[in-house]
């Protein structure tokens, strides 16, 4: 049989050198290199593609849908979700005073403003897309 001390070692001749299986090959030239391990601590929800501002932790889709609850007479919930409680309470009061008519109109207009990036969170950050 063979003695393990007699077997060929790494310096006993030419051997094929392969990268370890856990390390991948770099992408070919011209491809962008992305690292999934890096998260910007100043922008955990990403950055706006044009301005570079960090996104808010609040979603504009959720805020707009909550604002559309105004169609049922409860306008202002989307603004309260965004952290603008004074504005949201004012919308609730106007909805109650106008018997819901002001709530429907204001809710639709405000939902459109939220979805078109005209509304920001209380810290001035743009709202993020998605839920």
Image (cartoon, helix red, strand yellow):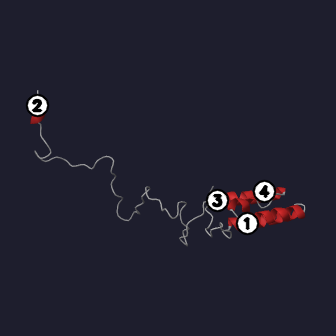
Which quarter of the rendered picture does the N terminus lie within?
Answer: top left
Mark 2 element type: loop
Q: Which of the two discs, 4 and 2, labels the residue nearer the N terminus? A: 2
Q: Position of residue 84 (x, y in %)?
A: 71, 65
Residue at the spot of label 3:
59
Residue 3 shows which numbered tag? 2
Residue name at image x 33 percent, y 51 percent: 23
State the residue lying farthest toward the bottom.
51
Name the side, left or right, on which 37 lies relative to 83.
Answer: left
Disc 3 to disc 4, how far (Cα)?
A: 16 Å
Q: Position of residue 68 (x, y in %)?
A: 77, 59
Say if mark 3 contacts mark 2, CB within 8 Å.
no
| In the rendered image, the vertical position of residue 19 relative to residue 31, given as above or below | above
Disc 1 to disc 3, how far (Cα)?
A: 14 Å
Q: Which of the two discs, 3 and 2, labels the residue nearer the N terminus? A: 2
Residue at the spot of label 1:
112
Please tell me whether mark 1 or mark 3 is closer to you in this view. 3
Q: Which of the two discs, 3 and 4, labels the residue nearer the N terminus? A: 3
Mark 3 element type: loop
Mark 4 element type: helix
Residue at the spot of label 4:
69
Say if mark 2 contacts mark 1, CB within 8 Å.
no
The image quarter containing residue 2 is top left
Mark 1 element type: helix
Q: Residues within 10 Å of mark 2 (few under 14, many from 20)?
A: few
Say if mark 1 contacts mark 3, CB within 8 Å.
no
Q: Position of residue 86 (x, y in %)?
A: 75, 66
């Amino acid at each position: 049989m063979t003695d393990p001390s007699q077997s060929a070692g790494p310096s006993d001749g030419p051997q094929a050198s392969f990268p370890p299986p856990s390390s991948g090959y770099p992408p070919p030239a011209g491809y962008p290199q992305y690292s999934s391990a890096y998260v910007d601590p100043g922008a955990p929800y990403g950055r706006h593609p044009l301005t570079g501002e960090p996104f808010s932790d609040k979603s504009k889709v959720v805020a707009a849908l909550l604002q559309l609850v105004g169609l049922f007479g409860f306008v202002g919930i989307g603004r309260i979700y965004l952290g603008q409680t004074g504005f949201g309470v004012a919308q609730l009061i106007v909805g109650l005073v106008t018997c819901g008519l002001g709530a429907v109109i204001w809710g639709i207009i405000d939902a459109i403003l939220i979805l078109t990036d005209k509304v920001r969170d209380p810290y001035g950050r743009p709202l993020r897309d998605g839920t």
